[in-house]
Amino acid sequence: MYTYTLSEARNRHGEIFDRATAEPVLLTKQSRPSHVLLSATAYTKLIDKLTELEEAVWGKKAIDALSKEEMIGTEEFTHALTKIANGEA
């Protein structure tokens, strides 16, 4: 990954934007990472992959909960809510 200072980014923005179409570019401020510049296509792919991974994690959690019988059926849920609503729980 190419690295530029924020000052360089102001002076060479055309070059940096061109480079960011091919790969992410790291911008630094006082020698510390400040921003990462990447193309809209790369950003979209990154977000899509993150969403896919999050969905996989939530799916795994649901399967684990089902296997541990931590989820209840609709009738039992409705009955529990009714008891709560009636002050019985």
Image: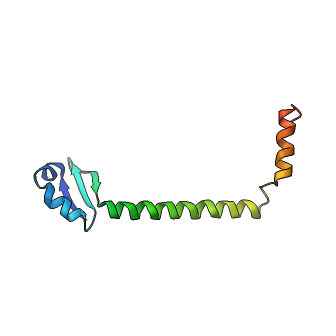
Q: Is residue 40 left or right of residue 82?
A: left
The foreground one among 15 and 28 is 15
Extreme residue in the right direction: 88
What residue lies at 83% left-to-right and 34% top-to-bottom? 85
- Residue situated furthest top in the rendering: 87
Is residue 10 rendered to the left or right of residue 71?
A: left
**Residue 18 location, quadrant:** bottom left
Q: Position of residue 71 (x, y in %)?
A: 77, 55
Q: Quadrant of the C terminus?
A: top right
Q: Quadrant of residue 72?
A: bottom right
For image coordinates 70% across by 63% down, the residue present is 64
- Specify the farthest residue to the bottom: 22
- 71 vs 5, left or right, is right
Q: Is residue 8 above or below residue 24?
A: above
Across and down, in percent, residue 34 comes to 27, 49
**Along the viewing direction, whichever of 26 and 38 lies nearer the viewer:** 38
Screen quadrant of the N terminus: bottom left
Residue 41 locus on image (x, y percent) = 33, 64
- Which residue is located at x 45 percent, y 63 percent? 48
In depth, the one of 7 and 52 nearer the eye is 52
| Colour theme | rainbow
Please state the horizontal and vertical placement of residue 12, each as a whole percent of the image: 11, 55
Q: In this rendering, would 65 be left or right of 31?
A: right
Q: How many marks?
A: 0
* The quarter of the displayed image where residue 82 is located: top right
**Residue shown at the point (52%, 64%) measured from the top left:** 53
